[in-house]
Image (tube, helix red, strand yellow):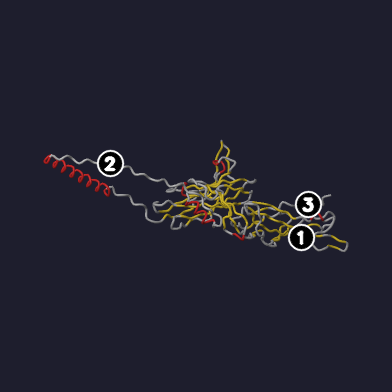
């Protein structure tokens, strides 16, 4: 029923493979009584570098592009990461009942679509309700014929009557033309304080369209419009885009992998950490902390994390927290663990704990998740290098 995830084109004799993978969140969309619904598509960057994805909808038979709206249309996807796009369905009134379908399409913003595009499996939806019935031409032809016969009979009677009595035919008068008043164009409403859903409906009722919606971490005013690009009382023309700033209460991210307490051998690299997407989050900040052990004259001292304290020289440089800002829901630690040169049990213990902060469209951090911990076994000092300096 669907098409291949990876669309392969040829340029000359050399095949070009798309770096993208796109998957729908469901095989079927259930529309409400107004023929509206939505479905999510997860776009994954399988390439070696970060890329900007352009998302669009391929309409199926019996539909056209005007049935669908996508949000957002573009997004940066880190290599190995994923981003979720939303396709909204709005069926046309009077559409013939029956099954329809759509598919998601993604391609790189900095390259020709025909070379990097990938298409998802089809997503089916059902249009219900009676279709518009065709008008029977006899419904209007019969009254017209009757009216013509009636007018002809009256005209004939007047002519005959005028020939007999010598009366003149009555003259006809033309009514003066009627004047129509033009309604003034609509003006923008004050959307501040509305919910995002009500603001979207108001913009549509005024003939505009919803532009870019950016979310700001503000739990006290959750789901409240904080700003709009078109000020109140300003004339709004049909199709004018209106950008919104909406307050949200970002939730903590749920950590997925590696599982808490997982262990990795010397031959394995640093693991990739993953977590669940947070609604309305524009990105994420991943924080790592490594555990450090110090050697003292009487033996090995307790091991501590950076936020619990720090050892003095020569272990000062081992204490550091690492941050990564990403758009997707995965990341790979970009730091190395080391054993102190000449003291095999001093330096990094191999224990690393990590947590994730959701980030809004303005760079504000949401609440952190809890910590997950993993252990990376270390071989010897030479593998990771001596302490700098």
Residue at x 57% of width, y 50% of height: 43
205 left or right of 338? left
Circle 3 packing at 10 Å, graded few (<14), some (14-19), many (20+), is some
Q: Element type at marker 1?
A: loop
Sequence-first tag of 3 and 1: 1
Image quarter of residue 286: bottom right
Residue 188 coordinates in the image, percent (x, y): 51, 50
Dot label at residue 60: none
**Contact between labelled residues 2 and 1, with CB atoms less than 8 Å apart:** no
The answer for how far apart the CA atoms under marks 3 and 1 are is 19 Å
Residue 323 coordinates in the image, percent (x, y): 71, 53
**Contact between labelled residues 2 and 3, with CB atoms less than 8 Å apart:** no
Sequence-first tag of 3 and 2: 2
Dot label at residue 305: 1
**Contact between labelled residues 1 and 3, with CB atoms less than 8 Å apart:** no
Residue at x 86% of width, y 63% of height: 299
Q: Residue furthest right?
A: 297
Q: Nearer the viewer, residue 267 or 262?
A: 262
Circle 2 packing at 10 Å, graded few (<14), some (14-19), many (20+), is few
The answer for how far apart the CA atoms under marks 3 and 2 are is 101 Å
Closer to the eye: label 3 or 1: 1
Dot label at residue 174: 2
Q: Element type at marker 2?
A: loop
Q: Residue furthest left?
A: 164
The answer for how far apart the CA atoms under marks 1 and 2 are is 96 Å
Residue 110 coordinates in the image, percent (x, y): 60, 41
Residue ID for mark 3 = 384
Q: Is residue 62 visible?
A: yes
């Amino acid at each position: 029923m669907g098409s291949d995830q990876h669309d392969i084109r040829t340029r000359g004799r050399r095949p070009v493979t798309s770096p993208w993978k796109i998957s729908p969140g469901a095989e079927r969309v259930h529309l409400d009584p107004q023929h509206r619904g939505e479905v999510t598509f997860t776009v994954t960057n399988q390439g070696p570098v970060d890329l900007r994805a352009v998302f669009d909808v391929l309409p199926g038979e019996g539909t056209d592009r005007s049935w669908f709206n996508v949000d957002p249309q573009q997004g940066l996807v880190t290599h190995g990461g994923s981003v979720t796009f939303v396709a909204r369905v709005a069926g046309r009134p009077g559409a013939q009942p029956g099954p329809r379908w759509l598919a998601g399409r993604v391609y790189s913003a900095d390259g020709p679509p025909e070379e990097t595009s990938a298409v998802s499996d089809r997503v089916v939806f059902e249009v219900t309700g009676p279709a518009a019935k065709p008008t029977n031409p006899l419904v209007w032809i019969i009254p017209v014929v009757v009216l013509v016969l009636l007018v002809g009979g009256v005209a004939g009677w007047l002519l005959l009557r005028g020939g007999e009595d010598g009366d003149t035919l009555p003259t006809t008068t033309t009514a003066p033309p009627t004047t129509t008043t033009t309604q003034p164009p609509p003006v923008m409403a004050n959307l501040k304080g509305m919910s995002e859903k009500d603001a979207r409906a108001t913009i549509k009722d005024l003939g505009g369209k919803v532009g870019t919606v950016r979310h700001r971490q503000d739990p006290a005013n959750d789901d409240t419009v904080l700003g709009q690009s078109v000020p109140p009382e300003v004339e709004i023309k049909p199709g004018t885009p209106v950008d919104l700033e909406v307050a949200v209460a970002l939730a903590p991210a749920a950590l997925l992998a590696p599982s808490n307490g997982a262990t990795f051998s010397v031959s394995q690299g640093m693991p990739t950490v993953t977590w669940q997407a947070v609604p309305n989050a524009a990105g994420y900040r991943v924080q790592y902390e490594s555990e450090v052990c110090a050697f003292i004259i009487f033996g090995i001292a307790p091991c501590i994390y950076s936020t619990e304290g720090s050892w003095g020289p020569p272990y000062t440089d081992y204490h550091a927290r690492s941050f990564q800002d990403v758009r997707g829901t995965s990341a790979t630690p970009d730091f190395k663990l080391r054993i102190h040169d000449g003291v095999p049990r001093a330096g990094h213990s191999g224990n690393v704990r990590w947590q994730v902060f959701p980030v809004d469209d303005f760079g504000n951090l949401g609440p952190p998740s809890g910590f997950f911990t993993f252990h990376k076994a270390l071989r010897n000092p030479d593998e990771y290098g001596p302490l700098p300096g």
